[in-house]
Image (cartoon, rainbow, N blue to C red):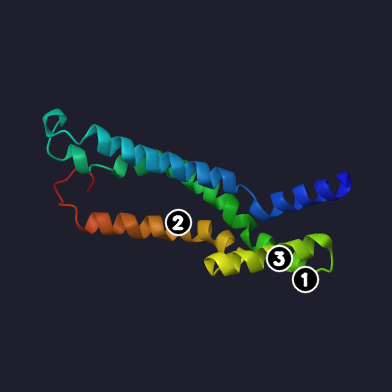
Amino acid sequence: SQKEMEGILEYSKNLFGNVEEVYHLSLILIRALEKHIEENQNPSTLKDEDSYSCVGDIFLRKTIDVKQIYESYLSNYHQAASLLERLKSEDTELGKRLCALEDEVMAKHGLYIQSFLITPVQRCPRYVLLLQEVLKHTPVAHDDW
């Protein structure tokens, strides 16, 4: 019914929050990195020898976006996880559908639905680890240092 559909839409907003913004930001970052690599593949077009490996500015330009988008997602995460568990435990059509979906996801991917909710939460520390690893292999005289 229309009312059930509206309820499901409201639940999905509460469950997934701004996950589309998180996804979009990830696409922007990966496309910027790919574009940088593509533009700097030809040694004859490089401005200097460090141009190819300078990626720090890509992350710096998106720092505020990363902070705002992930803070929004993170502030909703615990409520979303609790809501998911509550909905699955209810003896409703939605609860049954969620349990069936989770069985399907578990069979196919070996993960619970909640595992997908936590993925964006884990992304921020991974960005930090990635940049720390890049920095470890970056000479002090390099532009990204």
Q: Secondary structure at mark 3?
A: helix
Local crowd size for mark 3, using a 10 Å CA cut-off: few (<14), some (14–19), many (≥20) = few
* Mark 1, residue position: 89
Q: Position of residue 119 (x, y in %)?
A: 52, 60
Measure the C-alpha gap from mark 2 to mark 3: 31 Å
Amino acid carrying label 1: it is: Ser
Q: Earlier in the sequence, mark 1 or mark 3?
A: 1
Residue 53: tell me if it is visible. Answer: yes
* Mark 3, residue position: 100
Horizontally, is 67 left or right of 5 in the view?
Answer: left
**Could you say which quadrant of the image residue 97 lies in?**
bottom right
Q: Secondary structure at mark 2?
A: helix
* Mark 2, residue position: 124
Amino acid carrying label 2: it is: Cys
Amino acid carrying label 3: it is: Ala
The residue positioned 64% from the left and 56% from the top of the image is 76
Horizontally, is 91 left or right of 88 in the view?
Answer: right
The residue positioned 53% from the left and 65% from the top of the image is 109
Q: Position of residue 10 (x, y in %)?
A: 77, 49
Q: Earlier in the sequence, mark 2 or mark 3?
A: 3
Front position among marks 1 and 2: 1
The residue positioned 67% from the left and 60% from the top of the image is 80
Rendered view: 41 above or below 9: above
Q: Position of residue 66 (x, y in %)?
A: 47, 46
Local crowd size for mark 1, using a 10 Å CA cut-off: few (<14), some (14–19), many (≥20) = some
Q: Position of residue 105 (x, y in %)?
A: 60, 64
Q: Say which of 22 and 78 sits in front.
A: 22
